[in-house]
Image (cartoon, grey):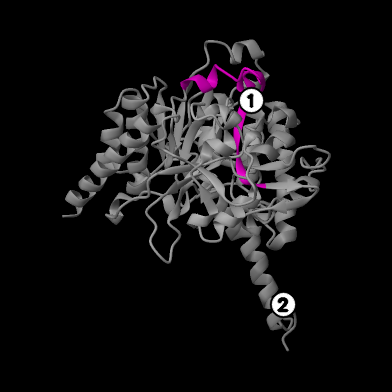
């Protein structure tokens, strides 16, 4: 053996290669990604002197490494919030006054989502007469559709933005925007939209009444929760009661570690009413007032591990972000459970009353949003009949949602169209739907009360919106067919 040369076992060589990879390649790759994303000048509201930059030289694989990076980055975000002059530091009257820029932001890209967005924006302008400006945000050239973008921007006060043209915040983990799924919505809310006060809408979420008043008019009983607290969210079907979860699927649960890892109080502990999970297809958010919350929001969504082990997608990260900012009480959510929208076109062996989506309420119990989810989504490229909203249920409990989810619909013996008998005061046939509250529905087990959309006591504006949507879907399918041909 020559002097100075030590024998190398395969294990030693492997460890050396891993060390080289971790110490040199990973930091280089991350820094290169960061350079690409930071090629656009940082927006003024995200810059301040002495802002910390997230160090990318450490990378540890596995769950333990993910937690180590999480808490290291937690300190960086805290430093950024404490050091930088964020809009949330401005006096509240300057931020939430009449000078605030208010509008709707819709993250959407590609033919499918932009087609749905065109339907949303057309109904907003032509049927609901909404005056709110709209920003449609797509994710890079791969999601750009010239025809649909031109049709969107031909509508009054609709602007399309490319999220890749916004500089990535250097105090967060460098994450490529290309290929993002649910995290993209959080990024748009935190860093892309230009609105101070914004209604975030999914591309397949259709307002059933004008959303303009959501920012300014509240409930006679509750007041305007958004003006008071700077946020308003809507519930999902799942709930926790006494630390037990009732869910459509186990993966939709929130694990206690999501809060205990940060030494935070569990939001479902010590509450009298069941804790309702959050559905993020729509939300009202005051970005100026809660700029610190937005930093925590992206902190959570940029750490897929371990956050994805604790909760599903982005939907429950918003509440956790408020808690991390020390503003748990500012997270406000509509208390009335969503309704189910049902299509009556099912054929055996499928149930005749099929899933179309979920319907959310305003603070007075009026039907406000139709979020077309799961098999209720509309894709013009499929060239097949879409599911309509022929019926709407009363607000459903998680237990009833579980029955429904087994077949994604209901069979005839599971529903009753005698809605007013069970859900309206004194069984009145003339009561407005908004008076038929969840608490007044008296149902002897099965069946579930459903209201026909053609019912005389349904807000006629809802029927107008649904008719307009059907016209839009027909036109979009025709355009897609012509394009394909």
- Mark 2: give few (<14), some (14-19) or many (20+) Cα within 10 Å: few
The quadrant of the image that shows the C terminus is bottom left
Q: Are marks 2 and 1 in contact (CB under 8 Å)?
A: no
Q: Is residue 217 magenta?
A: yes
The image's mark for residue 12 is: 2
Q: Is residue 183 magenta?
A: no
Q: Quadrant of residue 452?
A: top left
Seen at 66% across and 26% down, the residue is: 84
Marks 2 and 1 sit apart, C-alpha to C-alpha, by 45 Å
Residue furthest to the bottom in view is 1
Coordinates of residue 69 in the picture (x, y in percent) = 71, 51
The image's mark for residue 8 is: none
Coordinates of residue 203 in the picture (x, y in percent) = 42, 40
Coordinates of residue 369 in the picture (x, y in percent) = 48, 35
Image: magenta residue range: 212-238
Coordinates of residue 429 in the picture (x, y in percent) = 49, 30
* Front-lying residue, 407 or 322: 407
Is residue 346 at least partly visible in the picture? yes
Q: Quadrant of residue 484?
A: bottom left
Q: Secondary structure at mark 2?
A: helix
* Front-lying residue, 345 or 381: 345
The quadrant of the image that shows the N terminus is bottom right
* Front-lying residue, 326 or 435: 435
Seen at 66% across and 21% down, the residue is: 222
> In the visual, does 160 lie left or right of 225?
left
- Mark 1: give few (<14), some (14-19) or many (20+) Cα within 10 Å: few
> Mark 1 highlights which residue?
49
Seen at 68% across and 42% down, the residue is: 276
Is residue 171 at least partly visible in the picture? no
Q: Secondary structure at mark 1?
A: loop
Marked residue nearer the N-terminal end (2 or 1): 2
């Amino acid at each position: 053996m020559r002097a100075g040369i030590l024998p190398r076992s395969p294990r030693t060589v492997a460890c050396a290669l891993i060390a080289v990879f971790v110490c040199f390649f990973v930091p280089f790759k991350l820094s290169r990604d960061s350079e690409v994303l930071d090629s656009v000048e940082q927006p003024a509201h995200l810059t301040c002197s002495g802002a910390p930059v997230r160090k990318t030289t450490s990378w540890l694989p596995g769950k333990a490494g993910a937690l180590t990076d999480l808490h290291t980055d937690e300190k960086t975000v805290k430093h950024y919030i404490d050091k930088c002059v964020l809009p949330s530091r401005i006096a509240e009257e300057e931020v939430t006054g009449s000078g605030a820029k208010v509008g709707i932001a819709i993250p959407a890209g590609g033919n499918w989502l932009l087609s749905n967005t065109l339907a949303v924006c057309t109904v907003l302008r032509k049927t609901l007469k909404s005056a709110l400006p709209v920003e449609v945000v797509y994710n890079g050239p791969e999601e750009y559709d010239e025809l649909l973008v031109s049709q969107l921007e031909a509508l009054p006060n609709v602007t399309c933005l490319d999220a890749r043209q916004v500089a990535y915040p250097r105090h967060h983990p460098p994450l490529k925007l290309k290929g993002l799924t649910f995290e993209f919505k959080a990024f748009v809310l935190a860093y892309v939209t230009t609105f101070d006060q914004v209604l975030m809408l999914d591309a397949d979420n259709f307002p059933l009444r004008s959303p303009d008043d959501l920012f300014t008019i509240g409930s006679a009983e509750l007041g305007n929760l958004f003006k008071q607290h700077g946020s308003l969210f809507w519930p999902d079907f799942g709930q926790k009661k006494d630390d037990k979860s009732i869910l459509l699927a186990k993966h939709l649960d929130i694990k206690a570690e999501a809060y205990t890892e940060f030494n935070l109080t569990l939001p479902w502990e010590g509450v009298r009413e069941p804790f309702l999970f959050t559905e993020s297809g729509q939300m009202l958010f005051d970005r100026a007032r809660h700029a610190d919350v937005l930093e925590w929001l992206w902190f959570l969504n940029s750490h897929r591990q371990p956050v994805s082990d604790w909760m599903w997608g982005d939907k429950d990260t918003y509440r956790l972000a408020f808690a991390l900012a020390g503003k748990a009480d500012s997270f406000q959510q509509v208390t009335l459970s969503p309704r189910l929208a049902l299509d009556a076109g099912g054929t055996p062996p499928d149930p005749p009353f099929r899933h179309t989506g979920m319907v959310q309420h305003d603070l007075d119990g009026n039907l406000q949003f139709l979020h077309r989810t799961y098999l209720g989504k509309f894709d013009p490229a499929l060239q097949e009949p879409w599911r309509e909203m022929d019926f709407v249920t009363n607000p459903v409990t998680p237990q009833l949602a579980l029955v429904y989810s087994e077949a994604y619909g209901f069979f005839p013996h599971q529903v009753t169209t005698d809605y007013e008998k069970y859900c309206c005061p004194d069984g009145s046939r003339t009561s407005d739907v908004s008076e038929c509250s969840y608490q007044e529905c008296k149902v002897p087990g099965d069946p579930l009360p459903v209201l026909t959309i053609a019912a005389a006591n349904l807000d006629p504006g809802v029927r107008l919106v649904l008719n307009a949507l059907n016209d839009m879907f027909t036109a979009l399918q025709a355009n897609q067919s012509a394009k394909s041909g």
